Image (cartoon, coloured by chain):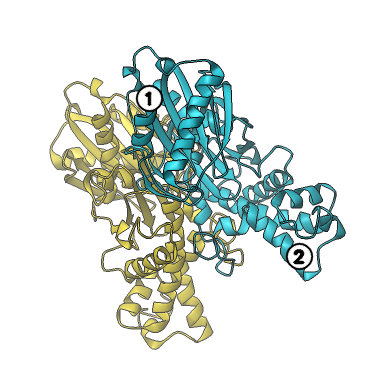
Chain colours: A cyan, B yellow
Amino acid sequence: MEQNRDFSSHGNASLIIGVDVGGTKIAAGLVDRDGQVSGRVKIPTDTSHPAKTLQAIADAISGVMQEAVVSAAQIKAIGLGIPGIVDPVRGTCLFSANLGWENVAVQDWLEQATGLPCAIENDVSAGALGESLYGAGQGQRQMVYLSLGTGIAARAIINGQLYNGAHGMAGEIGHLMCDPTGPRCRCGAIGCLEALAAGPALAEAAQQKIQDGSASPLLLKQLQHPEEQMRAEHVFAAAALGDSVAHQIIQRAARYLAYGLSFLVFTYDPQCIVIGGGLATEQSPLMTAIHQETARWIAQSPVARGRIGADIIRPARLQQDAGIVGAGALILAQERTQ
Amino acid sequence: MEQNRDFSSHGNASLIIGVDVGGTKIAAGLVDRDGQVSGRVKIPTDTSHPAKTLQAIADAISGVMQEAVVSAAQIKAIGLGIPGIVDPVRGTCLFSANLGWENVAVQDWLEQATGLPCAIENDVSAGALGESLYGAGQGQRQMVYLSLGTGIAARAIINGQLYNGAHGMAGEIGHLMCDPTGPRCRCGAIGCLEALAAGPALAEAAQQKIQDGSASPLLLKQLQHPEEQMRAEHVFAAAALGDSVAHQIIQRAARYLAYGLSFLVFTYDPQCIVIGGGLATEQSPLMTAIHQETARWIAQSPVARGRIGADIIRPARLQQDAGIVGAGALILAQERTQ
């Protein structure tokens, strides 16, 4: 699936809007050619019906124009990052669990609603482009972006261009079976990397320890009240306070993730792997553990050591604006290849 | 490592020589623009000293010119496939276990010796290009070639071009750790895919069964005399005769290989995976087992099934000439991008 649309036909309009469509909120803004964001808008995602979600996206777009005091005539194109399987050529979202979408013609609908050219991509693909153009992967022709959050997915930049593969599955290492005796993944398969090392897996492991009675008071204290749902952030907070059970949970996830990183090294062989997403903040104890475990497998592999070091891993640089910049980057990347 | 040399400067010469440098023999021939080979030459590889190996390669090249009755003035360029880590831009072989080479300036030496432009590549990379241009991967923009023999390695064709990665490690899935309790690989690491499923691993598993006393007479009968070294071919022959121990050994290797194929699918996401190399002949019971095991994991993965089938795997089409055609394809692929 390659995309090479020519957005230059849209008069002298030069501004770009990036829209980060999430399962709970839609964030949008103007993205300039230095990857800077202005005119930010954030509205809740109405997932009650695809038409309502699309309307909310259109609302976010007009919100940005109001906020930044620009007219539609000044907008060159709109880029959208969608959490799901996307056909960027036809502009449709084939499936999105987060949005409850199946075969939604996003691009056609939005182009009609806004009168502006739109481009859509998977949100991890957009993130990869954003980090490649403006973030930690700047200037690297071969780069992989790994998103760690509720799910796990990677996307590669190959020879300077986003690579989605023949069926839009390139980089979906979250669904590689890593443990045949592991838990069931939300995809339905057993022992996927995502089921072992994504946010919900960390939370579930902690919940299990609480039920077993093997959780420490430090871990329990992270919950404000007993009915509160355990989250990966609670595990991180307990680990930061020196809790050994939380530390073990993180270390185990990091071992699986380092294993996943070895897949990326022995297939894409990139100059760097940029790790982003909700679990990969710079202060995250998971990032520290991933560094340690990666250094370990590299040291154990005569083929890898000597060629790469654990510094192949870098934290993502685009922080709160990552989704918007990534979506805008869809348009900006097209400009660069024209 | 990208290579885009212009071989068109070499007058009106149009013929191409492909050289397949193996650990035991050097095979060479003229390769035409339909991937057909003529003027075949095969000589033993002298690995006693790099200078001797290079001289043997030069001898094979002049042998082809004699055999095909052509002069150096008619040769446009020479392509060489080398079993090792190659820097195709600088034209050096960084390391080859099979040839006993370390930092050998192959291209410079041969260009001086023959007076002709030369290009070198890793042999699996050359095989990938050959199958992509003239074999089972013809017409596929996204394709992976997996070589199964003494070693295991893959190379991807991405957007129609050979992809070696940033450190020449792209596709080296033979050195992915697949079993932490597995045997030591010849690379030095533990439990590599290659140590579990390449030719020597199959032979060793059979040898082990013989030592255990659990091998069947059918498997034992494959050896001409008791001192004969067990080889993967013996295991295949016993399995073809219905031997259940041989069958189990093959099935186990196929499970690991199908696992390796899942790495390739969830990273490169190609239109097809072409399997070649000594163990992957069309009649090989290993290929049948790989098909079965691949169908099984695809059926178990909701993300993969519906998008791909086990027919994503194809046997290589270039047979005895594969190495020569692949080496010639290095030059022919350059022509196509010019």
Q: Position of residue B223 (x, y in %)?
A: 37, 78
Question: What distance separates the C-alpha of mark 1 from that of mark 2?
Answer: 52 Å
Residue to which mark 2 is pinned: A209
Q: Position of residue B118 (x, y in %)?
A: 32, 31
| Observer able to see residue B88 | no
- Of B292 and B328, nearer the camera is B292
- Of A183 and B220, nearer the camera is A183
Tell me the number on the disc at residue B244.
Answer: none
How many marks can you see? 2
- Label 1's element? loop
Above or below for B183 versus A74 = below
Residue occupying the point 57% across, 28% down = A41
- Of B34 and A28, nearer the camera is A28
| Observer able to see residue B136 | yes
User: Which amino acid type corresponds to the residue marked 2 in the rendered image?
Assistant: Lys
Q: Residue furthest right?
A: A217
Above or below for A183 versus A100 = below
Residue to which mark 1 is pinned: A116
Q: Position of residue A96 (x, y in %)?
A: 46, 49
What crowding class fits label 1: few (fewer than 14 Cα within 10 Å), some (14-19), or many (20 or more)? some
Residue occupying the point 24% across, 31% down = B336
Residue occupying the point 43% across, 61% down = B302
Above or below for B258 versus A107 = below
- Label 2's element? helix
Q: Position of residue A39 (x, y in %)?
A: 57, 21
Q: Residue furthest left?
A: B69
Chain-order first, disc 1 or disc 2 = 1
Q: Residue furthest top?
A: A12
Q: Quadrant of residue B315?
A: bottom left
Task: Indicate the quadrant containing the C terminus of chain B: top left, top right, bottom left or bottom right.
Answer: top left
